[in-house]
Image (spheres, rainbow, N blue to C red):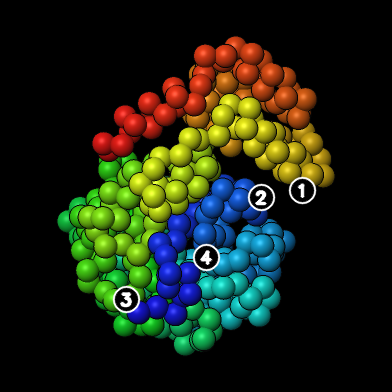
Amino acid sequence: MSTALPWFRNGFPLYLAPMAGVSDKIFRQLCKEYGADVLTTEFISAEGIFRRNERTREYLDFDEIERPIGVQLFGGNAEHMAEAARQVVDWVRPDFVDLNFGCPVNKVVCKNGGSALLKDCPTLARVATAVVRTIAPMPVTAKIRIGWDADSINAARVARILAEAGISAITVHGRTRAQGYSGAANWNVIGEVAAAVSIPVIGNGDLSNAAAVAKHRRETGIAGAMIGRAAMSRPWIFHQTKQHLASGEMVDPPNLRERWNLILRHCELVAREWGAEEPAIRSMRARLMAYSRSMPDAKRLREKFSHVSTLAEVKAIAEQNQQRSTGFTESTEWSKMESLKSC
Ligand SMILES: Cc1cc2nc3c(=O)[nH]c(=O)nc-3n(C[C@H](O)[C@H](O)[C@H](O)COP(=O)(O)O)c2cc1C
């Protein structure tokens, strides 16, 4: 495997997936504390960079402790993407720039961005080449899906084109654009991509526990793994996965009190960042619902979280939940993890 990215040289890096509306600075840093090795910003429009609007600035913001971190860009115009990448490098000097060739959302695809480029390989090659040349020696990586739809799975071909263009690593989300997030990720195709190129391939899709990462690593030859939705409810998945890959052991997840401490801290950090508690906590509702999936009495919690507006309300829910859940032990959780192992 040849690579310009130092974090592949002595290990198997775990990436936090870029997730719009989720992988902001606060969440990235929490995941880093739990062992995520490499972080990426949410996707950012190349056109937004030109307009230099306030929101785009916020997306680009990261702290030094987040390194190595990449800024993810999307767009379908090679010159604009290259110029946007140059400006990003000048402003914030990330460790790498990641090109989004996987986004399935209509408003991105209809402007020839994201996964639209999977069915327009000449433009994909032009975008990748232009960005690589413009910001060299800054490494450029790419994130793709396995194809546009089931009849046009072309990830191995796309990966060869990207490697030829000078891309330093490729993340493959094992679904087609047509699938959106439905069905299962196709890890056979991810394995084909890993075999097709000599640059690192990062596997992504449905990695919900440490055992799944170990299994797919063994079976596909990926050089790293990217975890998205599972980290939203269990950010400690990074720590558990690292321990499992290193020793074969499955370490206990945090106990209930520790989970609530994490949730409350997340809320406090967001409230402080916003400087206005109520809108901040309201903005956390979806995030709290994601956390509830890892908690006892999840259904009741979801209901309650859907109405919260203050830190005091979240704290009261935490108290109640801990009192009601005396039967929730790490061994309960452990047996759940064991049953997931076979996935
Ligand atoms: C809420 C949400 C937002 C996402 N935003 C992005 C994004 O900005 N850029 C990107 O490349 N992928 C994005 N994705 C896709 C994820 O990075 C990842 O490829 C996908 O969720 C599959 O991984 P998982 O099964 O571990 O969640 C997003 C996914 C979700 C659920």
Q: Which residue is mark 4?
A: 72
Disc with the residue nearer the chain's start (3 vs 4): 3
Is residue 308 something that shows in the picture? yes
Number of numbered labels in the structure image: 4
Q: Quadrant of the C terminus?
A: top left
Residue found at x 17% / y 56%: 151
Q: Quadrant of the N terminus?
A: bottom left
Residue found at x 56% / y 15%: 325
Mark 3, secondary structure of its residue:
loop
Label 4 environment density (alpha carbons within 10 Å; few <14, some 14–19, many ≥20): many
The amino acid marked with disc number 4 is Gln
The amino acid marked with disc number 1 is Glu
309 left or right of 330 in image = right
Q: Which residue is mark 3?
A: 1
Q: Position of residue 258 (x, y in %)?
A: 62, 32
Mark 3–mark 1 Cα distance, whole angstroms, equals 41 Å
Disc with the residue nearer the chain's start (3 vs 1): 3
Q: Are marks 1 and 4 in contact (CB under 8 Å)?
A: no
Mark 3–mark 4 Cα distance, whole angstroms, equals 23 Å
Residue found at x 45% / y 57%: 14
Q: Which mark is residue 26?
A: 2
- Res 260 → quadrant: top right
The outermost residue toward the right is 275
73 left or right of 101 in image = right
Q: Which residue is mark 1?
A: 273
Task: Give above or below for 195 relative to 343.
Answer: below
The outermost residue toward the top is 324
Residue found at x 52% / y 65%: 72
Answer yes or no: disc 3 within 8 Å of ligand 1. no
The amino acid marked with disc number 3 is Met
Q: Are marks 4 and 2 in contact (CB under 8 Å)?
A: no
